Amino acid sequence: MRQRLLILGVAMLAGCAANTPEAPPAPQAPAINDKPARVSRELTVAWDNYGRGGAALRQPAFVHVLGQDGSLTSNIASTTSETISLPAPILTPGDIAATMTAFEGIQSGNRQGYSVYEISRWERYCNAGKGMDEHDWRFIDAQGATNVPSEVITGCIPPVHTSHGYLQAWTHFCTNQGVTPDDRRIVRESVRPYSVVNPCKALK
């Protein structure tokens, strides 16, 4: 009797299970191949480089990354495109006139341009004449001793003697005639001229 009831219960369950309608299969999304985006070595960067690198702490900075994950490429591209798409400001005739007036003022200024070598001549002159030679003195005399360029005028200390005093001091020293302490100082702090007392007997 028990076996019959058991068989009957199993049959009823099987019948009920067979009558339930099957649910339609859920639509599956097409597979996305994201491998190229992960391994194509695109030129992308991300803010990273945190933590330790051996015994030292890494300096946080932009680092190169593979693919689009965590990168700032899209943000950079959108910012750049917005910046490029902005129209240039329109200049009014008043702006152009003011600019041209300022430009003409710059050009009309009486500024003398000097090469690096010529500036070095002025630097020797402004260092109380120490290290000056005859070429330096001829250059300073041609330019005018009061026309010191703005690059070296700060703290400029001109020598107490002139080019004539320079030549005279060397003449006195090389001929050993009437050498004064000032002549000795000038000789000690300058280079022998080529146009006078050449060769210098006192240096042999």
Image (cartoon, helix red, strand yellow):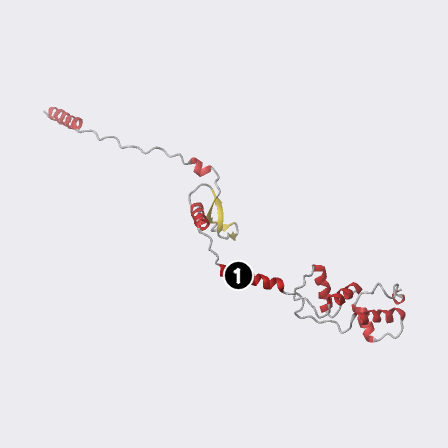
Image quarter hosting the C terminus: bottom right
Residue 22 at x, y = what percent? 21, 29
Residue 116 at x, y = what percent? 69, 59
Residue 144 quadrant:
bottom right
Mark 1 lies on residue = 97
Asked whether residue 132 is in view, the answer is: no
Name the residue nearer the viewer: 96 or 159.
96
Placement of 35 over or under 141, stated as above or below: above
**Residue in the picture at 56% in, 63% down:** 102
> Does residue 5 appear left or right of residue 139 in this picture?
left
Disc 1 is placed on an element classified as helix
Image quarter hosting the N terminus: top left
* Label 1, residues with CA under 10 Å away: few <14, some 14-19, many ≥20: few
Name the residue nearer the viewer: 165 or 106.
106
The amino acid beneath tag 1 is Ala
**Residue in the picture at 88% in, 68% down:** 174
Total numbered labels? 1
Looking at the image, the residue that sits furthest to the left is 1
Asked whether residue 190 is in view, the answer is: yes
